[in-house]
Every structure is written in C-alpha cells, then in structure tokens.
Image: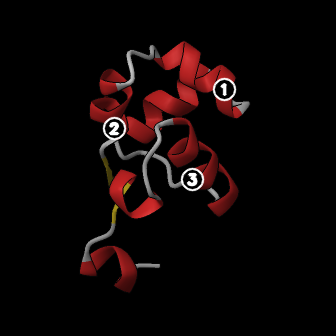
Amino acid sequence: MKTRIKELRAREGLTQEELARMVGVRRETILFLEKGKYNPSLKLAYKIASALKAGIDEVFLFEEEDLQNS
C-alpha cells in the first residue's frame, strides 16, 4: 500500500518521532508505513489521518492489486 504520510507529515511540520508519539507507536512504525512495508490497523490509520488533518483515503492510497491481494 502506498501512503502520503511523509508528504503530509512535512506539510504539518512533524518529524517521524513527533507523529509516532501523537498516535502512540514507535518511530520505526512510521518509517515502515512511509516505505509501504507495513499495513496499519484501521484504528491506527484513523489516528494517523487525524494527526495529519487529512482523510484516511488521502493518506493511504489503495490500488486495485492491493485489494485483490488481501
């Protein structure tokens, strides 16, 4: 899954560490999300979107193949 976390985080002036603290995860989790190596739970996706002042669908970009491989 592709994300816009890095871009939106920069827009809000947040570091990975700051965003991680805001949503209750480790900085490495944010790093893995940004690199597309980890799919968040719906709860975490919601927290991240809220922290970035964006909708879940603006932060997480689903592609047809993502849906087929689930």
Residue type indicated by callout 3: Ala
Q: Residue at x 49, y 48 (%)?
A: 38
Is 63 displayed left or right of 46 in the figure?
Answer: left
Residue receiving disc 1: 22
Q: Residue at x 45, y 14 (%)?
A: 15
Residue type indicated by callout 2: Lys
**Viewer-side residue, 9 vs 38:** 9
Residue receiving disc 2: 35
Q: Vertically, is 19 above or below 35?
A: above
Marks 2 and 3, how far apart at CA: 15 Å
Sooner in the amino-acid sequence: mark 2 or mark 3: 2
Sooner in the amino-acid sequence: mark 3 or mark 1: 1
Q: Are marks 2 and 3 in contact (CB under 8 Å)?
A: no
Residue lying at the far bottom of the rendered structure: 68
Residue receiving disc 3: 45
Q: Residue at x 47, y 79 (%)?
A: 70
Q: Residue 35: in sight, yes or no?
A: yes
How dense is the environment of label 3, judged by Cα within 10 Å: few (below 14), some, or many (20 and up)?
some
Sooner in the amino-acid sequence: mark 1 or mark 2: 1
Q: Residue 1: in sight, yes or no?
A: no
